[in-house]
């Protein structure tokens, strides 16, 4: 027994609000991250830990496995992924909506032909 195809339900207002929030977050991250990363890099360049034995011990512990430099690089990659994910999600949503509309059109046309 075949069940009638009932389509895909996309709550447009909810999806649009969610995508707007995602875009706003992605814009905020893209806008503020360079400034924040620059501030961290400036403070690191000042080398406030000093050149003595204690300062060198701190430096070696702090920069182990990339330390804050690796953190900054990961933040930059994450920011790019946030923007990219939003773009890909928007495309997937648009494709779903268009596919749903195309199937509805085809089903309606087939019904008339029979």
Image (cartoon, rainbow, N blue to C red):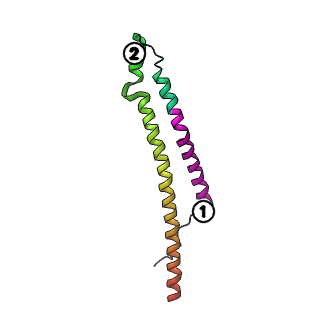
What residue is shown with label 2? Answer: 57
Above-or-below relation of 106 to 76 = below
The answer for how far apart the CA atoms under marks 1 and 2 are is 56 Å
Query: Does the stretch in magenta take in 33?
Result: yes
Query: Does the stretch in magenta take in 25?
Result: yes
Residue 105 placement (x, y as % from top left): 52, 78
Residue 22 placement (x, y as % from top left): 56, 50
Q: Main secondary structure of the magenta part?
A: helix
Q: Residue at x 49, y 76 (%)?
A: 3
What residue is shown with label 1? Answer: 12
Above-or-below relation of 64 to 53 = below
**Closest to the observer, 66 or 4:** 66
Q: Residue furthest top?
A: 52
Region rendered in magenta: 11-36
Q: How many marks?
A: 2
Above-or-below relation of 48 to 90 = above
Residue 35 placement (x, y as % from top left): 54, 34
Q: Determine whether the residue tagged by mark 2 lies in a helix, strand or loop.
A: helix
The reply, left or right, for residue 42 in relation to residue 11 is left
Residue 114 placement (x, y as % from top left): 50, 89
Q: Residue at x 44, y 33 (%)?
A: 71
Q: Determine whether the residue tagged by mark 1 lies in a helix, strand or loop.
A: helix
Above-or-below relation of 32 to 64 = below
Asked if residue 5 can be seen in this view, the reply is no
Q: Residue at x 51, y 61 (%)?
A: 93
Q: Residue at x 61, y 58 (%)?
A: 14
Q: Which mark is drawn over residue 98?
A: none
**Closest to the observer, 66 or 106:** 66
Kindly indicate the quadrant of the structure image that contains residue 59: top left
Q: Quadrant of the N terminus?
A: bottom left
Asked if residue 71 can be seen in this view, the reply is yes
């Amino acid at each position: 027994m075949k069940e009638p195809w009932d389509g895909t339900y996309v709550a447009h207002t909810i999806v649009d609000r969610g995508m707007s929030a995602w875009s706003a977050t992605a814009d905020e991250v893209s806008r503020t991250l360079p400034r924040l990363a620059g501030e961290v890099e400036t403070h690191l360049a000042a080398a406030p830990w000093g050149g003595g034995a204690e300062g060198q011990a701190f430096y070696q512990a702090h920069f182990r496995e990339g330390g804050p430099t690796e953190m900054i690089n990961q933040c930059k990659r994450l920011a790019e992924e946030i923007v990219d994910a939003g773009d890909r999600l928007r495309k997937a949503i648009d494709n779903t909506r268009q596919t749903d509309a195309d199937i509805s059109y085809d089903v309606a046309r087939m019904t008339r032909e029979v």
